[in-house]
Image (spheres, rainbow, N blue to C red):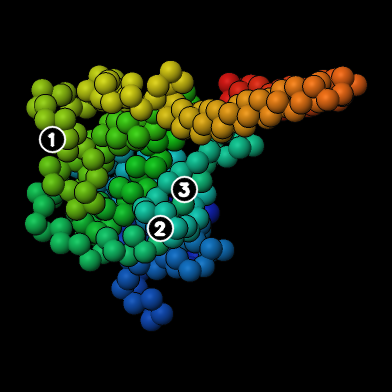
């Protein structure tokens, strides 16, 4: 029988778990018969991390006694995120995202959009062909969907997706490839029509109009397919720099440099004209003309520095 410890090894005092049914939350007069996930307060950042881990602890207990296709994955995600992740609230981004701890790469943070989490409770899951064995672990499909959001971010970190340089060069394609590979492993997200409208193998094939693309492959496999399909578009977008952002920056800087060079040329022509006039009336003004030329050379040097910065 499972003990009353959560994934961090701490006893959950606020909502004790019954000994008779260790995977079911006991009821009390304060919280009624609500699930742990329904008790999470997205407006309180101080208690949010603890509450999410309490919920995952409860899911972990239920997965211990369950027998379904996702049992081992659910237990791993709960255990791993309970030990390595810190959960925060961020309602400024669409769903959720994760990022590594700068000081210690073994740990990471998962930020969740609370409004998005609440919207998952209102979706009509009955219209989708979902795996009924999910209910062997989760109270309902809404809870399974919420867990899938957490698991998605955890698997990004576990698979080291932050450390692949090539993914950072073409983030638009990398995000699609990474999501396609990960979502095939997750409950709710792997069905042909998933309630979260997340990209999976079915959506990936439809996106590229190619039913021969294999399922359950690595993210590199899907990334290379995208690069090949969009080869011509990428060449136009990335140019010689191999990075769309750098290329756009380079274009803006080159445009500015071109304008600067035109201005320098106009100044030079004006100086030459003034110099000829001065030579015509007074030869002693040659020194002043040379000084003006030095100033223009200085401006051109500034333009060269801009080019150097662009290269860097």
Q: Kindly identify which numbered label has been placed on residue 113.
A: 2
Is 180 positioned to the left or the right of 308 in the image? left
Residue identified by numbered label 3: 110
Nearest-to-viewer mark from 3 and 1: 1
From the viewer's perspective, is 156 left or right of 260? left
Mark in the foreground, 3 or 2: 2
Question: Disc 2 or 1, which lies upstream in sequence?
Answer: 2
| Residue drawn 33% across the image and 21% down it | 235
> What element does badge 3 sit on?
strand
Q: Which residue is mark 1?
A: 206
Please state, as top left, top right, bottom left or bottom right, where the C terminus lies in the image.
top right
Circle 2 residues within 10 Å: few <14, some 14–19, many ≥20? some
Task: Say which element carries label 2.
Answer: loop
Tell me the CA gap for discs 2 and 1: 28 Å
For this rendering, which residue is in front, 227 or 38? 227
Front position among marks 2 and 1: 1
Q: Residue at x 52, y 31 (%)?
A: 255
Residue 75 visible to an observer of this rendering: no
Residue found at the very far front of the displayed protein: 281
Q: Are marks 3 and 2 in contact (CB under 8 Å)?
A: no
Q: Quadrant of residue 175?
A: top left
| Image coords of residue 111 (percent x, y) | 46, 52
Query: Counting other residues with Cα less than 10 Å from the Cα at mark 3, is it few (<14), some (14-19), or many (20 or more)?
Result: many
List the single residue furthest toward the bottom. Answer: 29
Q: Nearer the viewer, residue 263 or 119?
A: 263
Circle nearer the N terminus (3, 1): 3
Most distant residue in the right direction: 284
Q: Residue at x 28, y 26 (%)?
A: 233
Up/down of 175 relative to 66, above or below: above
């Amino acid at each position: 029988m499972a003990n009353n410890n959560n994934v961090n090894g701490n006893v959950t005092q606020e909502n004790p778990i019954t000994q008779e049914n260790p995977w079911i939350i006991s009821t009390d007069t304060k919280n009624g018969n609500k699930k742990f996930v329904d008790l999470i307060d997205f407006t309180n950042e101080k208690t949010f991390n603890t509450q999410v881990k309490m919920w995952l602890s409860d899911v972990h207990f239920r997965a211990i006694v369950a027998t379904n296709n996702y049992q081992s994955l659910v237990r791993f995600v709960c255990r791993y995120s309970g030990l390595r992740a810190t959960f925060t609230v961020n309602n400024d981004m669409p769903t959720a995202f994760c990022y590594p701890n700068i000081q210690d790469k073994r740990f990471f943070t998962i930020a969740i959009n609370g409004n998005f989490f609440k919207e998952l409770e209102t979706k009509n899951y009955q219209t989708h062909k979902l795996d009924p064995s999910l209910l062997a672990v989760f109270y309902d499909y809404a809870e399974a969907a919420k867990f899938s959001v957490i698991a998605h971010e955890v698997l990004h970190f576990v698979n080291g997706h932050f450390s692949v340089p090539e993914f950072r060069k073409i983030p638009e394609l990398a995000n699609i490839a990474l999501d396609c590979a990960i979502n095939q492993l997750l409950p709710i997200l792997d069905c042909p029509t998933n309630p979260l409208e997340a990209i999976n193998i079915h959506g990936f094939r439809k996106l590229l109009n190619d039913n021969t693309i294999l399922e359950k492959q690595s993210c590199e496999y899907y990334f290379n397919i995208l690069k090949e399909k969009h080869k011509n578009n990428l060449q136009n977008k990335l140019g010689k720099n191999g990075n769309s952002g750098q290329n756009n920056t380079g274009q803006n800087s080159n445009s500015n440099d071109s304008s600067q060079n035109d201005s320098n040329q106009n100044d030079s022509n004006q100086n030459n004209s003034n110099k000829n006039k001065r030579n015509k009336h007074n030869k002693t003004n040659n020194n002043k003309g040379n000084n003006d030329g030095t100033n223009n050379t200085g401006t051109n040097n500034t333009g060269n520095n801009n080019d150097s910065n662009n290269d860097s």
